[in-house]
Image (cartoon, helix red, strand yellow):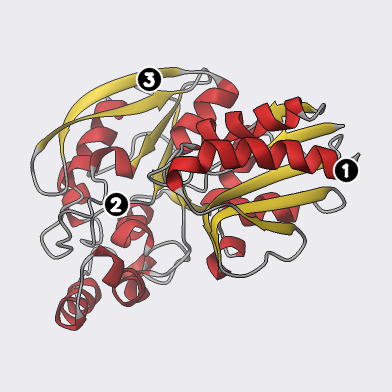
Amino acid sequence: MRALACPASLKGVLTAREAAAALAEGLRKGGAEADELPVADGGEGTAEALRLARGGEWRKADVVDAFGAPRRARWLLLPDGTAVIEAAAAVPIDPGRLDPVAASSRGFGQLVEAALAERPRALLLALGGTATMDAGAGFLEVVRELSVPARVACDVMTTLLDAPRVFGPQKGAGPIEIAELERAFAAREDIVAVSNLPGSGAAGGLGAALASLGAQLVPGAALVLDELGFDAAGYELVVTGEGRVDATTRLGKAVGEVVRRSAGVRCVVFGGLVDGDVPGAETVALSGDPARAREDLAALGADLVAVSN
């Protein structure tokens, strides 16, 4: 049996690479030939997934985080000259400090400027997992133009004016802050022309800021899988999954895109927590114990091969 282990990350527990390795270990113990292809959707792990699949060099820059503290952030230069930059590398969400009104995307602008200084051929910008809800105001203070073609991998395709209501609460906004953010977003004359674009609300409105500079907004999961060269043909089993499987899994997430592209091949989706099935795939719940995640994935891989035999 040929099997493909292509999970996304289990946030805060295992990276996509670690999850793929554990799965593949189990698949091989069961007797399968297993390939590893960690995936991402434009959020956490996007640059690492591309580096593992295509190579490249990590570069580092000094920036500030969402609240102005010094931060050392990295970005990836691919062999073809494309700079891959994650917004969350500079301004990640920190559960210990949720303040969407005060958080700034300026540090992400600094990281992009550092990459542009090395004259890349193009930019691939990954949005997702940020602390910010400033509609890219801080970013635009630093980056006034994009001197090379830029594509933006959006982990969600929410529009700008919907972003405060949809994502404000998870970043610490209550009803008063949400209303304040909605007024601020609607008053932004510099980005109003792109406010209805799908993805303009990604990363607290960073999508709109980038679109206003001419960047192309693209669904992140599809873009990343294209860049990875994902192809389920030739495999008898595809195993993917993430920390929590729910209704959002099939709506723009990497796991849902893997399932869609694996039509005709047996596809299994795992979740540390499972709240609903994923159409087109078998859905399996792990133990839910983060300390057992590696063990769970190795056991799952071995069990899947045993059942197939």
Q: In this view, does 218 lie to the left or right of 141?
A: right
On screen, residue 67 versus residue 217, left or right, reads left
Q: What residue type is labelled 1?
A: Ser
What residue is shown at x 24% (from left), y 27% (from top)?
114
Question: Residue 234 location, x and y as percent?
Answer: 87, 34
Classify the position of the C terminus by image quarter: top right
Of residues 82 and 256, the one drawn nearer to the viewer in this rendering? 256
Which residue sits at x=21%, y=50%? 105
In the displayed structure, 34 sits above or below 98; it is above
Label 2 vs label 1: CA separation?
41 Å
Whether residue 45 is visible to the viewer of this picture, yes or no, is yes
Name the residue at 61% across, 40% down.
Answer: 297
Pick the residue in front: 172 or 124: 172
Determine the secondary structure under disc 2. Answer: loop
* Residue designated by label 3: 58
Kindly identify the amino acid type of the residue bearing the numbered disc 2.
Answer: Thr
Is residue 118 among what the camera can see? Answer: no
Q: Where is residue 155 in the image (x, y as percent from the top left)?
A: 46, 55
Amino acid bearing label 3: Trp
- Which-is-in-front pick, marks 2 and 1? 1
Residue 83 point in image, percent of width and height: 41, 28
Q: Are marks 3 and 1 in contact (CB under 8 Å)?
A: no
Residue holding disc 1: 308
Which residue is located at x 17 percent, y 53 percent?
96
Of the numbered discs 3 and 1, the one sitting upstream in the chain is 3
Which residue is under mark 2?
130
Across the whole image, how many numbered discs are drawn on residues? Answer: 3
